[in-house]
Image (spheres, grey):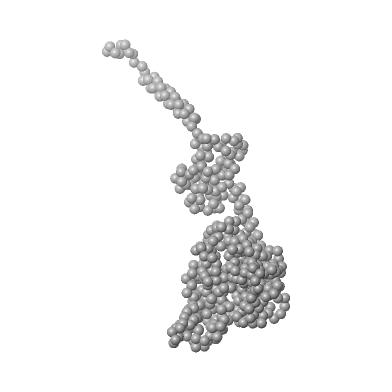
Amino acid sequence: MSTSSSYFPSFPRTIVSYTLSTSLFIVFFLCSVFIFTRRSLEPSLSPYHADIPLPATADPLLLPQIEHLPLKYPKGTPPRDADGDVTVKTNPKTEGADDVAVVGTKLKAVEDSRGVDPTEKTELGEGGGSSGEVSVEGEEESNAESAEHAVVEKIRGCDLYSGSWVKDDEYPLYQPGSCPYVDEAFDCQRNGRRDSDYLKWKWKPDGCDLPRFNATDFLVKLRGKSLLLVGDSMNRNQFESMLCVLREGLSDKSRMYEAYGHNITKGRGYFVFKFEEYNCTVEFVRSHFLVREGVRANAQGNTNPTLSIDRIDKTNARWKRANILVFNTGHWWVHGKTARGKNYYKEGDYIYPKFDATEAYRRALKTWAKWIDQNVNPKKQLVFYRGYSSAHFRGGEWDSGGSCNGEVEPVKKGSILDSYPLKMKIVEEAIKDMKVPVILLNVTKMTNFRKDGHPSIYGKNNTDGKKVSTRRQDCSHWCLPGVPDVWNHLIYASLLLEAHS
């Protein structure tokens, strides 16, 4: 036996193994206590903690965005201390629900950045925001849609163009002199007209009532779109009315302006008005005939006007860009050279020595209709044609002493109320044969009543007391506020119908 074995007796192998295991267990236990104590001093990493709003089932695609998402607390969230923790006491029964609401709010922000529709359902329930907020907004939208639907059902199937004029407190839709876009020729009150009953008439269809005009809702329906009026000075009359009625729906009227800085004048044939708040435009393009005007040189070297009834007007490139189009033509077809038709009407390269003005009008409307069918997408664009507007000259025409001065109320009876010009029958024929649907604003009979609505001698300012000339009166156009406001009211009603068709 060796010396070492005499001084250090051997222990059983099982005792050595037990001692080693016990020592390792004690070391592991002490380390666990140390780690647990340190962890308890750190903020909780619960998945519902407000600083890291990640539920256990969070979409992994959201992780990179949520990691860098700044803290934004919804309105009504309790105040937080410097560390971001809520400092107000919570009800244990609702504490979980509050945390989920915060998570939902932050996930909504992330979904917005990804383009997720907040109304779509997610794994958390209703998309971003608290269920209460979504419920209230959804209920308000639903109520508004229900109310609009009820209004639409009342006018669906009703002939909006057969009726009479009634006095109504809703009119005028804007006060005389309040709209800066009415040019002098239509600004009758500023030009010295003293009677005002003509401002208070509203159109009442026989079988229904027009929905109350809502300028703000009209602008909402135009959001992101362009509305273009194309035609003669009668459409410029309606264009100025449109600017004025829509202006009433703006909270900040400085955010409406002519895109190129132009003032409205008779000499300019193109205007673009921008409504910034709604990202929409209302525009006007002058086109007297909708087909192409031109000139020809005669034997003496002078130039004479021509009208190509088989070619669309050269402004048509601007028509293509519009979402809503309102066309008209008519009044220029009864003027001198157009009515006489001598060496004026043209098809191809041939100028007719003599041609009937009515037949020329029919062919021109067919040219316009063909262009609409070939260039308008009815899924993206809406087309109106505004019918012939009645004139009321007594004792002559516009250039031969005709007058309407002194008329202060609508016509109540007489043959004029049933007057319906051949031009309107031609328009109806053209529209009937078209592939693209066209809404006919058939204002002819309603304007038959309104002999009181023209500027007459008040087409120029006469507030300085000078004697007014009565030699040439305007009994074709309309004072503003006035009759064209109703035409735009009818467009609004048509847009309501279209939205629910």
In this rendering, does residue 195 appear at all?
yes
Residue 24 location, x and y as percent? 40, 24
Q: Residue at x 54, y 83 (%)?
A: 337
Foreground pick, 324 / 472: 472
**Residue located 60% across and 75% down the image:** 387
Image coordinates for residue 347, horizontal then vertical, percent: 47, 83
Number of numbered discs: 0
- Determine the residue located farthest toward the bottom in the rendered image: 353
**Is 185 on the left or on the right of 298, as rendered?**
right
Q: Is residue 283 visible?
A: no
Quarter of the image where one finds residue 484: bottom right
Q: Residue 97 or 168: which is nearer the viewer?
A: 168
Task: Report the residue at 47% width, 30% height from top.
Answer: 39
Q: Position of residue 285 (x, y in %)?
A: 52, 70
Check the picture and name the quadrant holding the N terminus.
top left
Image height of 417 relative to 30, above or below: below
